[in-house]
Amino acid sequence: MTRPERREASANVRRARQLLAGGATLGHAAALIVVGVLFFVRGPAGALSGAISALAVLAFFGLGQLVQILVADSSPQVVMAAALGSYAFRVGLPAIALIAIGSNPERLAGMDRVSVAVAAISVVLAWLAGEIWAFSRLRIPVFDPPESDPR
């Protein structure tokens, strides 16, 4: 049995993967740190609340970047439609969950709101810093490659 031939990823896909790696690395590091700090400062309930919040942020950004990897070589119209569609899904799903939970607020009585906010803000800032750091190191040509058939 032979292995299927693997194509090398295009430059666009490699760049999108680098952005995902940069954001995910700092995002996960921040999540681990903030949950540990919340455990000592706010107790187990604070750590659990922070962990849930951090996981939600990581899923939000990770899914968005995964979609960008999948459509990296598509036309600009497809990339924009995919980005907007994934954003609508990533915002719509939590909105529906919050509406359902809002009908019975006792469901969130055990959540530590301070821990949720601290974890979410920390992980968002770390993810964005990781993406900015990765983006600053991308090799993006600033000119069009020469045509192979000059006339």
Image (cartoon, helix red, strand yellow):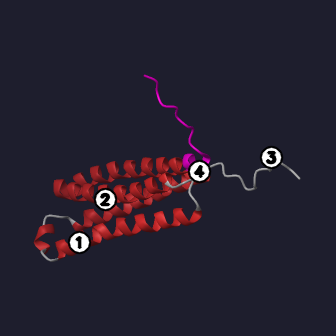
Disc 3 on helix, strand or loop?
Answer: loop
Q: CA distance from mark 2 to mark 1?
A: 13 Å
Q: Earlier in the sequence, mark 2 or mark 3?
A: 2
Q: Earlier in the sequence, mark 4 or mark 2?
A: 4
Query: Which marked residue is nearer to the observer: mark 2 or mark 3?
Result: 3
Which residue reaches farthest front?
1
Residue 98: assigned label: 1
Residue drawn where x is 37% and y is 64% of the image: 121
Q: Is residue 31 left or right of residue 25?
A: left
Quadrant location of the N terminus in the rendered image: top left
Q: For mark 3, what is the residue? A: 148
Query: Residue 146: horizontal and vertical position, in percent?
Result: 80, 50
Label 1: few (<14), some (14–19) or many (≥20) C-alpha neighbours in 10 Å:
few
Q: CA distance from mark 2 to mark 3?
A: 47 Å
Q: Earlier in the sequence, mark 2 or mark 1?
A: 2
Magenta stretch, overall SS? loop
Q: Which residues are magenta?
A: 1-15
In the picture, residue 127 is in which quadrant?
bottom left
Q: For mark 2, what is the residue? A: 56
Q: CA distance from mark 4 to mark 1?
A: 36 Å
